Image (cartoon, rainbow, N blue to C red):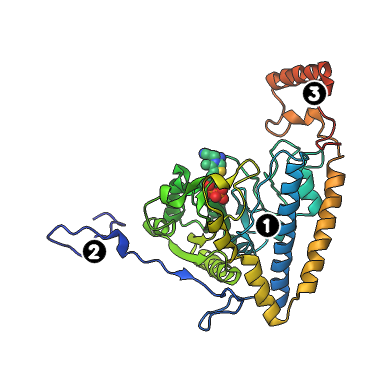
């Protein structure tokens, strides 16, 4: 018999396995009022970590509110919020080591903030100006930072999944005790790259946390039109990896699951799949209007499960935080972000010569020719090409 073919019990009449027999429990630690379930085991968390998580929540809420408004005012071209998914994103990011590599989808900027991306760096990317680390070549929200071990976002869905398998395998090869974490939505899990990436990671023993944000929709496609199985968690089992489903709106449950998953991935040099059940409270992006595919009632029900509020109540119960501080910090971030917008939108766009750099060691003759054609085109129609990326 081939190794790895696990023929177990034998049967002598046809009995299909019952797809509904697979029960996957959901880890919960915090109740809606911010108290922990009596039997719940808390993650490793002290006051400093808790306050850093809360600060990241406050910043992200304000950033999302202000930048969506900036998009509506025509100041930036595009924006995506992570409102409602902060616990899934920040709770998992807080369980990592700074050397662990993050491969995100596009809705995980809160993890980048947790790592230390500054307000100015956010603005430079969103305004595609000359200070942007990506040299203004990407749409807003496609952040990346070598320094913070955050791989640049790719628009095509799921490309980050097999890449994460490779990053994890590189750590294994170097015998470095770090992991890759790969964020993706349940919609992205319909891509072939998801299946290739997970299977490869399980077979090669690549230390990766595959972190699925199951937020109910892939733009307008609800999960019941996306899959017929038991969520995304059932697929982790199918590929032979440790798997857990958590309440994605429960900061402490996400933190606990990710801390344990990280320890397991390093100790056993194997991947883990976490499926965080959550809800996208905002639109898919600034180009989307959810009223065409879901009801206000449904949104309202999920607002009752606000992950930031639940965590804040836990902090207040512990005496580590209070409402006055919360209001104060939100106001400070509003002012800081508004001031940063005003600066970033006045910064010049990147020097056009940089457009052909960084891909080839020496730009090819064809690229150089195209750059000259572009320059003469701009010289002919200068009023159609702005000098800064902002409105002013
Ligand atoms: C290969 C590919 N197909 C389609 C798209 C268009 N697209 C962008 S986001 C998205 C939905 C993804 O949903 P999900 O993975 O659940 O993430 P969420 O937006 O809900 O966070 C689609 C279909 C794309 N970017 N790439």
**Tag of residue 110:** 1
Of marks 1 and 2, the one in the foreground? 1
Name which of mark 3 and mark 2 comes first in the sequence: 2
Mark pair 3, 2: CA separation: 69 Å
**Tag of residue 8:** 2
- Report if residue 157 is visible in the image: no
| Mark 2 surroundings within 10 Å by alpha-carbon count, few (fewer than 14), some (14 through 19), many (20 or more) | few
Name which of mark 1 and mark 2 comes first in the sequence: 2
Quadrant of res 99: bottom right
Of marks 1 and 3, the one in the foreground? 3
**Tag of residue 384:** 3
Badge 3 element: helix
| Residue that extends furthest to the left in the rendered view of this protein | 12
Residue 267 placement, left or right of 84: left
- 181 relative to 359, above or below: below
Name which of mark 1 and mark 3 comes first in the sequence: 1
Q: Are marks 3 and 2 in contact (CB under 8 Å)?
A: no
Disc 2 residue lies near ligand 1 with CB under 8 A: no
Instruction: Identify the residue at horizontal 64%, vertical 71% (top origin).
Output: 311
């Amino acid at each position: 018999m081939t190794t790895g073919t696990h023929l177990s019990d034998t049967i002598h009449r046809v009995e299909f396995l019952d797809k509904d027999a697979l029960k996957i429990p959901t880890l919960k630690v915090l109740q809606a009022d911010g108290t922990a379930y009596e039997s719940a085991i808390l993650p490793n968390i002290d006051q400093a970590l808790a306050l850093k998580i809360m600060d990241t929540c406050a910043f992200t809420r304000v950033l999302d509110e202000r930048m969506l408004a900036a998009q509506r005012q025509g100041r930036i071209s595009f924006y995506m919020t992570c409102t409602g998914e902060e616990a899934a994103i920040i709770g998992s990011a807080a369980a990592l080591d700074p050397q662990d590599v993050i491969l995100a989808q596009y809705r995980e900027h809160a993890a980048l903030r947790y790592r230390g991306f500054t307000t100015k760096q956010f603005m430079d990317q969103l305004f595609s100006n000359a200070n942007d680390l990506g040299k203004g070549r990407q749409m807003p929200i496609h952040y990346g930072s070598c320094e913070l071990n955050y791989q640049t976002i790719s628009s095509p869905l799921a490309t980050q999944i097999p890449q994460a398998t490779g990053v994890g395998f590189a750590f294994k090869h170097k015998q470095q005790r770090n992991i890759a974490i790969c964020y993706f939505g349940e919609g992205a899990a319909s891509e072939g790259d998801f299946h290739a990436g997970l299977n490869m990671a399980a077979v090669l023993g690549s230390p990766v946390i595959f972190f699925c944000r199951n937020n109910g929709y892939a733009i307008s496609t609800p999960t019941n039109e996306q899959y017929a199985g038991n969520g995304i968690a059932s697929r982790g089992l199918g590929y032979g990896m440790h798997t857990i489903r958590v309440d994605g709106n429960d900061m402490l449950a996400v933190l606990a699951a990710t801390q344990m998953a990280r320890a397991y991935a390093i100790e056993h040099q194997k991947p883990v799949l976490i499926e965080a059940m959550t809800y996208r409270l905002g639109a898919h992006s600034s180009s989307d209007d959810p009223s065409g595919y879901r009801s206000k009632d449904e949104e309202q029900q999920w607002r009752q499960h606000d992950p930031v509020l639940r965590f804040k109540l836990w902090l207040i119960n512990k005496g580590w935080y209070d409402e006055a501080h919360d209001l104060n910090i939100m106001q400070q971030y509003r002012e800081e972000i508004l001031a940063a917008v005003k600066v970033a939108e006045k910064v010049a766009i990147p020097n056009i010569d940089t457009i052909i750099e960084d891909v080839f060691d020496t730009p090819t003759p064809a690229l150089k020719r195209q750059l000259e054609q572009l320059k003469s085109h701009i010289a002919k129609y200068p009023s159609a090409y702005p000098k800064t990326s902002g409105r002013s």
